[in-house]
Amino acid sequence: MARARKPVVEVRRSQRRRRTVSAYRDGERVVVLIPDRFSRAEETEWVERMLARLEAREERLRCTDAELLARARRLTTRYLADHAAAVAPASVRWVTNQNGRWGSCTPDDATIRISHRIQEMPDWVIDYVLLHELAHLVVPSHNARFWDLVNRFPKAERARGYLEGVSAAGTLVMAE
């Protein structure tokens, strides 16, 4: 696949900004916000870094349902191989109508739905949510046997903490 051409970049320097750098798309251009004190070399370094981050983020957002199903199969092979017969989802897909949960599973028809809200989260968090839902194909409830399956994922506790933090932050009002 041919690589897209580099976008037009607008760098905005701020005297109020001390350490943080951020970037976002504004139509066809990318706006990079940096501290005013950065040298030209630091500016160049950070522009490249932020373009790479935006590209990685957008790549995650382009993940199709088919790719999500393939990812679920890789997780099954790695963490639930002893239950491979039970863990055969009929479908795994992104959905936009789940705002109160990260994912859901219907064991009766072996369908898994993953909230689009996690698409921008780190890969290990997405993997955790997928594995959590895959484990429901073996154990429908949240009993000890279920958690034993989920905890095979090495970053399970960390991912739960991440998701709890995101949930808590959603209830906070940020003010200066």
Image (tube, rainbow, N blue to C red):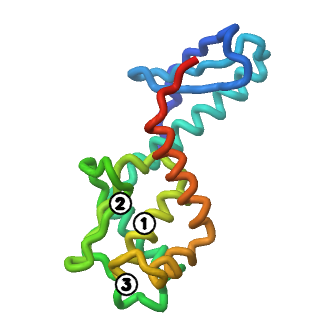
Between 168 and 80, the one lying in front of the other is: 168
Residue picked out by circle 2: 103
Residue at 25 percent across and 72 percent down: it is 106
Which residue reaches farthest left?
A: 109
**Label 1, on which residue?**
130
* Mark 3 burial class by Cα count in 10 Å: few <14, some 14-19, many 20+: some
The residue that appears at 41% across and 23% down in the rendered structure is 28
Q: Mark 3 — residue?
A: 138
Residue 95 spot, x, y in % from top left: 27, 53
Q: Mark 2 or mark 3, which is nearer the start of the sequence?
A: 2
Residue 23 sits above or below residue 140 on the image: above
Q: Earlier in the sequence, mark 1 or mark 2?
A: 2
User: What amino acid type is highlighted by mark number 1?
Assistant: Leu
Residue 1 seen in the figure: no
Mark 2 residue type: Gly
The amino acid type found where label 3 is placed reads Val
Calculate the distance from the C-alpha at mark 1 to the C-alpha at mark 2: 8 Å
Q: Position of residue 5 (x, y in %)?
A: 49, 32
Secondary structure beneath disc 2? strand
Q: Quadrant of the C terminus?
A: top right
In front: label 1 or label 2: 2
* Horizontal relation, residue 53 to residue 40: left or right: left
| Tag 3 and tag 2, C-beta contact below 8 Å | no
Label 3 to label 1: alpha-carbon separation: 13 Å
